[in-house]
Image (spheres, rainbow, N blue to C red):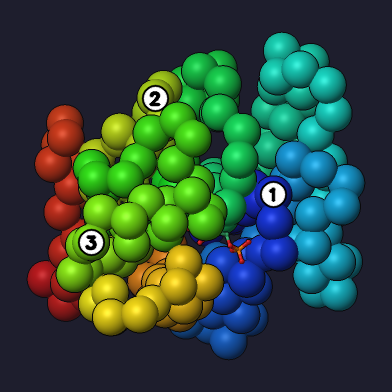
């Protein structure tokens, strides 16, 4: 599977997926890194690994055709959003139906939607006094964080946690959850039926 990863930040999830491709856990490779800003740390990681990257500039109606063209040129057949802070245009969703996934640092449908990203999520979870949070991988649709859930993993919220403590605990879980989900897609084990997503075990 030829994977494109879209990111806006440090890119630790990009790295986790890249590492799992390099060590053979995921039968695939990252063929393109798309960053939403020129100072995104993910770009350095891509360069180090010799992975082609591009930076989005201007409004989405300008960059959408450029991205679709580059995805075509690189043969990308799957898109993983990893801390990508822009809305995915519908033309892109239509090009990759059921093949664009996102990781969100909470247990969707809770703590999702516009404005709920990064530390905002963890602050809201702590302020609400939740005893659990986690990470969710979902299929991307035309709204923020509303697409079918593919997989979730829970973590506890501990007494006295700061938002940073919780973010670090959730991120650790993301680094195993996200490569596992991408692997399942690469192995053709993900079945989507409307809002219902099933991951089949390797030998079933
Ligand atoms: C991750 O925690 C991811 O779940 C979150 O941004 C972080 C990116 O970290 N994504 C969102 O909040 C999207 N709504 P990374 O750059 O180290 O992979």
Name the foreground residue: 87 vs 98: 87
State which quadrant residue 107 falls in: bottom left
Front position among marks 1 and 3:
3
Kindly check if marks 3 and 2 are in contact, taking CB atoms under 8 A apart as contact.
no
x 71%, y 12%: residue: 61
In the picture of the structure, the residue carrying the numbered disc 3 is 129
Q: Is residue 21 visible?
A: no
In the picture of the structure, the residue carrying the numbered disc 2 is 143
Left or right of 71? Residue 106 is left
Separation (CA) of disc 2 from disc 1: 18 Å
Q: Is mark 1 within 8 Å of ligand 1?
A: yes
State which quadrant residue 154 falls in: bottom left
In the picture of the structure, the residue carrying the numbered disc 1 is 8
Mark before the other along the chain sequence, 2 or 1: 1
Left or right of 196? Residue 148 is right
> Residue 16 in the image: x percent, y percent?
57, 75
x 87%, y 52%: residue: 39
Name the foreground residue: 50 vs 152: 152
SS class, disc 3: loop
């Amino acid at each position: 599977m030829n994977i494109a990863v879209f990111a806006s930040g440090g890119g630790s999830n990009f790295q986790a997926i890249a590492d799992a491709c390099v060590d053979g856990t995921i039968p695939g490779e990252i063929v393109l890194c798309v960053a939403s800003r020129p100072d995104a740390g993910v770009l350095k990681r891509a360069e180090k690994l010799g992975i082609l990257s591009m930076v989005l500039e201007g409004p989405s109606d300008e960059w959408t055709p450029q991205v679709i063209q580059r995805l075509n040129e690189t043969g990308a057949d799957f898109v993983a959003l990893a801390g990508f802070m822009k809305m995915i245009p519908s033309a892109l969703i239509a090009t990759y139906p059921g093949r664009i996934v996102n990781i969100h640092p909470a247990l969707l449908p809770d703590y999702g939607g516009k404005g709920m990203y990064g530390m905002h999520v963890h602050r809201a979870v702590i302020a609400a006094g939740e005893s659990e949070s986690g990470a969710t991988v979902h299929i991307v649709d035309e709204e923020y964080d509303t697409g079918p859930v593919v997989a979730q993993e829970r973590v506890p919220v501990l007494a006295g946690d700061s938002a940073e403590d919780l973010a670090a605990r959730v991120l650790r879980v993301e680094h195993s959850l996200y490569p596992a989900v991408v692997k399942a897609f690469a192995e053709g084990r993900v079945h989507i039926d409307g809002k219902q997503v099933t991951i089949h075990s390797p030998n079933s």
